[in-house]
Image (spheres, coloured by chain):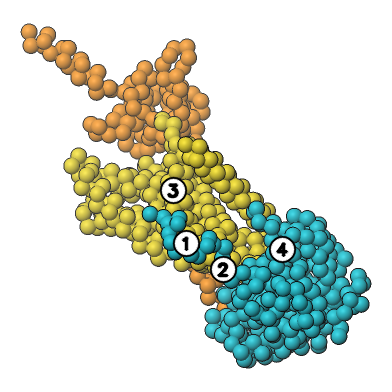
Amino acid sequence: MRSSGSQILVGLFMLAGFAALVMLGYKVSNFQEFARQDTYTLIANFTNIGGLKVRSPVKVGGVVVGRVSNIELDNRSLTPVVYMAIAAEYDQFSSESSAAIQTSGLLGEQFISLTPGGDEVILEDGDEIEDTQSALVLEDLIGQFLFNRPSGNN
Amino acid sequence: MNDAIARLGAGTLTFLATLGRSGHLLIRSLLLIPGWRDLARISLQIFSVGVKSLVIIVVAGFFIGMVLGLQGYTNLVRFGAEAALGPFVALSLVRELGPVVSALLFAGRAGSSLTAEIGLMKATEQLAGMELMAVDPLRRIVTPRFWAGFISMPLLAAIFTAVGIIGAYLVGVSWLGVDGGSFWSGMQDSVDFQKDILNGVVKSLVFGFVVTWIAVFRGYDTLPTSEGISRSTTQTVVHSSLAVLGLDFILTALMFGELN
Amino acid sequence: MQGNKATRDEGDSHVRIEDMHFHRGERAIFNGISLDIPRGKITAIMGPSGTGKTTLLRLIGGQLIPSAGAIHFDGENIPELGRSALYRVRRKMGVLFQSGALFTDMSVYDNVAFPLRENTSLPEAVIRNIVLMKLEAVGLRGARNLMPAELSGGMSRRAALARAIALDPEIIMYDEPFAGQDPISMGVVVRLVKSLNETLGLTSVVVTHDVQEVSSIADYIYVFAGGKVIGQGTPEQMRADQTPRVSQFMQGLPDGPVPFHYPAPDFEQDLMGADSHE
């Protein structure tokens, strides 16, 4: 058949297309993380989340252990509630752990930094981290600095 | 004045009739379920629609990636943020440039040749002859080309994007000295598989569908003269390029519109 | 000879058109025509260019639907047939288009094999035999591996003829088979039309305006003008016809009822610039 040569090329073309998709999945995007879906959820209340977004990383000592999965406003206390999806392998956070919203660099993206505590009780799926520290908002800091300076000089 | 209104009305009616005929063609050719014989025909059409567009897609993707690497670097380095080159390049390519530019190239390369081919078959009475030989030209000619375009487009867009990222890597990392590790890991941090890559694939599926539809319809509906074919070919490129850009805005608004 | 009224009674007609009207936009192409195409005979449909002769073939093939009237093919009314019934009927028809309409991306062999492969489930060996038989009939067995672009005009028309008879149709319709042919290939086509009609007993419909060629082979002639049948009969009767319009066409006179001049105002006045556009 005349078409067999072109059929091989079509096969190669489709292989190349799928290879490109696989490369985009594994090398370019977070597909590996996406594929590994064993996570459990921790909840934390903040007074101000600053620029935190869904999918912002959750880190312990700089190591990414999870992502922010959802952000809501608690209707009663009117404070933000942050849901974090933590990889199932990191399941040893005690109830005394604390969560802080920090910024990578001066203007970089914001993330949640978890600091493990020493308590015996281990946090499980759906538990809440009590000890939280809200985002530092640069504008507030500048405002405080300007407000406080006269008294500092006197 | 009356004349202008009459012309507007006539134009609207012509437009509606054209839309109706193209919808009729779409429905009739998609209702035909491909069988084994059709698969061989689809593969032959993937060859002429997809494989033959590969060179222009790869070359264009490579150069666009290199330009993105260069422009991104010169602008980011002023803020000391050249580490953001990876995410910048990857997000531009995956979300927008990959699907859109490859669809525009596809319209110019494959769409115009589809229109010209089918139009020529119509002008030389090959379609009419087929019909009188009790063979449905929609099934034999239109349907395989349709599926071939639909299948080829996302693959071409993926190849375009991947080659573009490699081009940006060559310029940014190998030439300008951005750190390779942060190039890739920054990308992985900011490109979401579901939100960015899959949405990009959905975009290119939609573009492939629309471009092939316009191309096939313009060929099938052409005036069977050489002037008619050349006009239809031009119309294919113009209409499908505009359709791609317009749809891209709508799709982007739907997919990425709600800011987090 | 054969073409007298007696051979055209109902039982014998293969295609029978009754009071058929067809409009394209505002323009009436056919204005109530009736004709019979007798089985196994060569019927010529003649008329000046632009009288819708090709349209008539498309109407018989069911590609166009008349606005009124009936087209009976073997007793079935074509315009009323559903899709699958129409395709079944079309398998009994062969059409030779003016341009040949060979598929440009296939060799001559594959072109002739095309209707067989699409419409039958014959094994490839049988198809090969049929294709070679048909190609032998038109004298192109040696050209089977050529592509249509490599054929001369006369050869591609013969190859298209082989394809048109591949399914052994009952009726074959020729659209301007003699147009644009050199004298030799014209003679070849004339002989082929005649011999296919005789050896296979094919009902043949020849649409043409080549009076001389078709008069030598046709059994019966219809002459069209202005959407109507203006004359019919055997070639002898037609040549003797004294109706002005028919005789003008049959003799090929430049002026007559069909005027040489496109309608225009008086020549003298026109030259004087009576209505000249400034």
Which numbered mark, 3 or 1, is in the foreground of this view? Answer: 1
Label 3 SS:
helix
Label 2 SS:
loop
Q: Is residue B257 above or below residue B11?
A: above
C-alpha span from label 3 to label 1: 50 Å
Chain letter behind tag 3: B
Q: Residues within 10 Å of mark 2 (few under 14, many from 20)?
A: few
Three-letter code, disc 4: Gly
Hey, which quadrant is residue C113 in on the image? bottom right
Closer to the chain start, of discs 1 and 4, is: 4
Identify the residue at horizontal 22%, vertical 44% (top origin): B75
Q: Dot 4 corresponds to which residue?
A: C227
Q: Position of residue B9 (x, y in %)?
A: 54, 40
Q: Is residue B53 left or right of residue C254?
A: left
Q: Dot 3 corresponds to which residue?
A: B242
Query: Which quarter of the rendered picture does the N terminus of chain C lie within?
Result: bottom right
Three-letter code, disc 3: Leu
Q: Which mark is residue B91?
A: none
Q: Which chain is cyan?
A: C
Q: Is residue C96 above or below residue A71?
A: below
Between A68 and C119, the one lying in front of the other is C119
Drawn colour of chain A?
orange
